[in-house]
Amino acid sequence: MSKNTCRTSTPKGLLIRLWVILAVFGLAAPGVEAANGDLAAVSDTLSSSNRELIDMAEDSRDGTFWVLGANGSSVENHLIYHLSRDLNTVIETVENPHPSGSISESNMSLNRGIAFHDPTGNLFVLSLTGPRGQQGYEVRAVDESGNANPAFSFPVDLEGEDGASLFGLSFDIVSGQLWTLDINRDRVLRIAFDGSVTRSLLLPDKLSDETLIRGKGISFDNEALVLYITYGSILDQGASKIIQLSTDGVLLNGEQSAERTGIEVPLAQVPEIDLRGIVPYLVGAGQNRFAVIGGSGRIYQLEQVLPEVIPPSQLSCGLTITSEVVLNWINNGPGDDGAYEGSIQLLRNGIAFATVSGDVTSYVDSTPINGPSTYALRAANDELFGPIGCECSTVVGPGGVINWTTAPTHGCYDLALVPGVDKIYVTDDEAGTISILESDLGEASEDSFPSPWANPGGIAFVPAIQLGFPPQLYEDFIAVANTSDNRLRLSSLAEPGSGTTINLRFPAEMENPRIGGLTYIPASAPSQQHFVVTERSSGEIYIFRTNGNLVRSCSPPSLFLDVAVGAGITYDPLRETLLTSFEDGVVRELYGDGPPGTCPLTAPSFDISLEAVGNGFDQPGYVGGIEISANTLLVCLPGNGTIFRTLLFPFGPDFTRGDFDRNSEVDLTDAVAAARYLFLGEASPVCMDSADSNDDGILDISDPVYLLFYLFIANSPPPPPPFPEAGNDPTFRDNLGCQE
């Protein structure tokens, strides 16, 4: 899986800054036909370091705007601002009907939304108000002169909507009620003037916790009679587009869900992540725009172009274990199930590469381009294609996302894979829990494991370890680090209450060490069995004996890599190396041995960027624990409590298993050539992986024998994939590889 977004991941920072400058000074090129999502203008009128804006509403009488300050910590930040139609002039300010106060006071309103009431001309303001610990949501009304109207004041009754966190407010002229966005539970709520919730709809794609909807903006369009919300997936740090919803709701999996209409407005040209209120409005006949509040206090004006042919929407890119890209989408044509009368064109990195019929809703790109790619669609109801819809992007090869899930407790610190049972154990230091998932990130039958600590952190599977004197053998244990000190607890998987505690002896000069990731190096000799941790404050890797004594600490030499070590670390038994996450969002391979204080990078270096797991991949602390699982890498993101499964093996050339001489045929000559190489020292294979007929990671007599059995003995198993067709090696990290 990968980004389903209209906020492109390609480097457009310079272009965006230029657009903002041109828009602010009115220098954007005239005569250019506007495209959907184009940045038309930017208002700095209310941007100030002392002011934070939260929502806005259009005054339907004259097309001016009302903008709400965020909270009552200062008078400037608590006011309601009346702006001109071009958003560049403050016409007047109005007192907020909710009480203001300083942050230190026990009763201060946190403003959340504003709506214009067409029938009366009143402004409705939604705030979270009341004494600390007893706060609730309340709507109060005020007229344009600042006079409160108690007749339109009421508390919001959220009984049955536990955990709701409301942002945004908009008046629905059809129902005569108000809409707001519940950002905690990803719902839109309709509220009557007695405070009751009359409609509660899940946002689209929120059928499980896998999807986190980003954004705080909601607006009811009294012309089109539809809702608009800001939207972004769990892979986005903020909203990536505005989507249009019907207000009726549909029943999906037993839940009432809001339904997309297919209309989307990309937010790629807004150079901010923290977006607040939105308002659709008209600037001329058939000319639609959106005003969008940014966290900086700037108000961005975007073009909305409604095409005759609405492009396919909800485009998603999914990556398979064999590096194919699976595209899925929803059609918005006039036919049955949204089918188009014409065809649908698929674009990759802006270039058309395939065309399918107008009723198709999925496609498999079996020959994708290695590295980052962006996909888009456009459709035709006749011979002419309409505009391109919102894009999705993915990474093919190392670091590409296979799938993800939200951690069971919505938080994660580190994770460990237990082979054999194929279970993933996930620590959540804030919840104080250890959860269990299947290795494919599905739900496990047993959902938790007793945590030995109130704040469990690093975690590792320990298949066998000898401790004490005389040595005692411990098998199938989980090691869990305490985040508040230097202790590890070994807990038996079979009997969680049994085990032992190990104190890791960090250098005496290190005060209050904080363990990040944890991994275990197994070995037949007890002296070679080690625990390895990352330490959060120093950015160092520490290697300990099983009795807790320090062996060495190290980090990559700054001469070659001047980037701090992150939290994640895992041991690769195939290559006998450490995979470690770094603060630039890259996982690199290191040797555990080296000159004093140094963990050298492997040569040739093996590193993968984690850009596919979200826009914040290179922010410090974004990536938590990591763990190797076959030819994939499990990645924990503490910030949003998400676990990803990404590809680990590099994208190499295609080959056919058993094809020693690379002539595209697997026959007797391949078995003979393999035997001659092994026993007569004749020509070596160009592609070692193709010669590994049984895919056991070793070239020996078993390979030609395996091939002979397949060729000449009935019912013998064929060579493992890739076979019989050429393809990528699903077991790359077997120390062989293919160099051709």
Image (spheres, grey):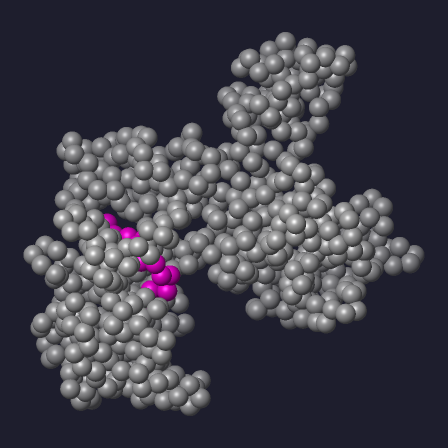
| Residue 514 image offset from top left, x and y in percent | 67, 66
The location of residue 603, given as percent across then percent down, is: 67, 38
Q: Is residue 604 visible?
A: yes
Query: Measured from the top left, where is residue 94 in percent x and y?
Result: 21, 84
Q: Quadrant of the C terminus?
A: top right
Q: Position of residue 368 (x, y in %)?
A: 42, 33
Left or right: residue 740 versus residue 93 is: right
Q: Is residue 16 magenta?
A: no
Residue stretch rendered in magenta on the structure: 262-276
Q: Residue at x 22, y 38 (%)?
A: 379
In the orientation shown, which residue stands out farthest toward the left?
285
Q: Nearer the viewer, residue 702 or 70?
A: 70
Query: Residue 669 vs residue 156: left or right?
Result: right
Indicate left or right for 562 with 378 as reference. Answer: right
Q: Residue at x 18, y 74 (%)?
A: 89
Q: Quadrant of residue 135?
A: bottom left
- Check the image and report above or below for 669 versus 718: above
Residue at (41% x, 55% y) in the render: 236
Q: Is residue 273 magenta?
A: yes
Q: Residue at x 72, y 72 (%)?
A: 511
Q: Nearer the viewer, residue 339 or 125?
A: 125
